Amino acid sequence: MCTRCPSVVSLERDDTLEEPVVLLSKDSEYSNPKNCALGEETVFIEELTNGMTKSGMITHEPIYIRVRMKGCPTLTLTDLPGITCNCPDPGVNIEEATVNLTTEYIKRPGNIILVVIPGSEDFNNPKALKLAKDLAEERTIGVVTKVDSLHADSDIIEKIRMEREGDVRLPQGFIAVRNRTKNETDLSVEAVREKERELFTTDPKLKHLKPEEWGIATLTQKIVDIQSSVVGDFMPNIKATLKQKIDALGKELQGLQHTFATPEESNGRYLEIVIKLVRDFEDTFTG
């Protein structure tokens, strides 16, 4: 099992940077973070994961990764452990644990669900896709990988276009992408995108896909578009909930005006209230 805990990856656009900056931490405040270059984070992720759980096991505790770079969209992605039945400890129901973790994130109304599926696989089989269709199909995108190693008689075009009666259908559809290979870790983002463009415009089969059916750039834009819609749908509820919390905290502040002996004590309590309000906002949006 490669991924054994949720990895929360925050992309932040900063056009002043010449090279990407990566920070990793075990907490969302990034206290005592690890710094590395883009492409070197795998070693640090493994190190942090090994300190949180033993090999073959999963944990609900996330790792936080912040990537600041030129030209990227500002958004947050969470990579989850895949649903599996294989566990070195026979006393642990790893399938139940991974299903429960996946369900927890799918149910959060502010999340966009990306179900990653190898192109050679029957799209009817993945349990994660079945869960997403049942619980949040309007927020689910199928991401099709490993399309550069398919047989010539593959039905990948039909599966992505959902053309046949038995094909899995998603309102947001499927998008094929080309992954960076192990030999391409030193390539720039632009070079990797060019290799992806070359694959989808020259491969005898894949070249029949429409531009909106392939590419990391297409996938990224789709995520941004859906997220904008989700935020718009939930904004009235978020505003109403936050107003209630702000009103309640305002009353608490009024009651605290004469209860502290020193300004330092008062400022400390005010800071605690502000932090609580920020966390309430995060909880309101993520569910």
Image (tube, grey):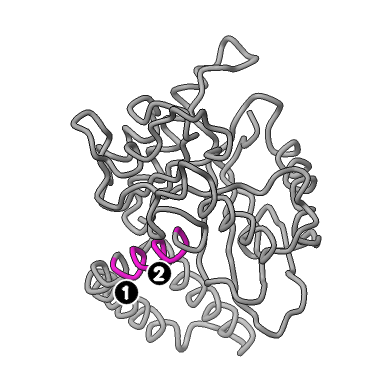
Horizontal relation, residue 135 to residue 90: left or right: left
Residue with the most extreme left position: 165
Q: Position of residue 163 (x, y in %)?
A: 24, 39
Where residue 156 sits, quadrant-wise, is top left
Q: Position of residue 83 (x, y in %)?
A: 48, 28
Please, what is the three-letter code of the amino acid marked with disc 2? Phe
Describe the element under mark 1 as helix, strand or loop. Answer: helix
> In this picture, is 232 found above or below 183?
below
Horizontal relation, residue 106 to residue 269: left or right: left
Please, what is the three-letter code of the amino acid marked with disc 1? Leu
User: Which quadrant holds the N terminus?
Assistant: top right
Query: Residue 155 versus residue 118: which sits nearer the camera?
Result: 155
Write the residue at 59% across / 72% down: 12
Q: Which residue is mark 1?
A: 242
Q: Which mark is residue 281?
A: 2
Q: Position of residue 155 (x, y in %)?
A: 38, 32
Query: Residue 244 versus residue 81: which sits nearer the camera?
Result: 81
Describe the element under mark 2 as helix, strand or loop. Answer: helix
Residue with the most extreme top position: 90
- Whether tag 1 and tag 2 are in contact, CB under 8 A, the answer is yes
Q: Main secondary structure of the magenta part?
A: helix
In magenta, the rendered stretch is 219-229
Write the residue at 47% across / 72% down: 278
Q: How many residues crowd mark 2 within 10 Å: few (<14), some (14–19), many (20+)?
A: some
Horizontal relation, residue 227 to residue 43: left or right: left
User: Which quadrant holds the C terminus?
Assistant: bottom left
Query: Could you tell me how far apart the alpha carbons at marks 1 and 2 are, in whole angstroms?
Result: 7 Å
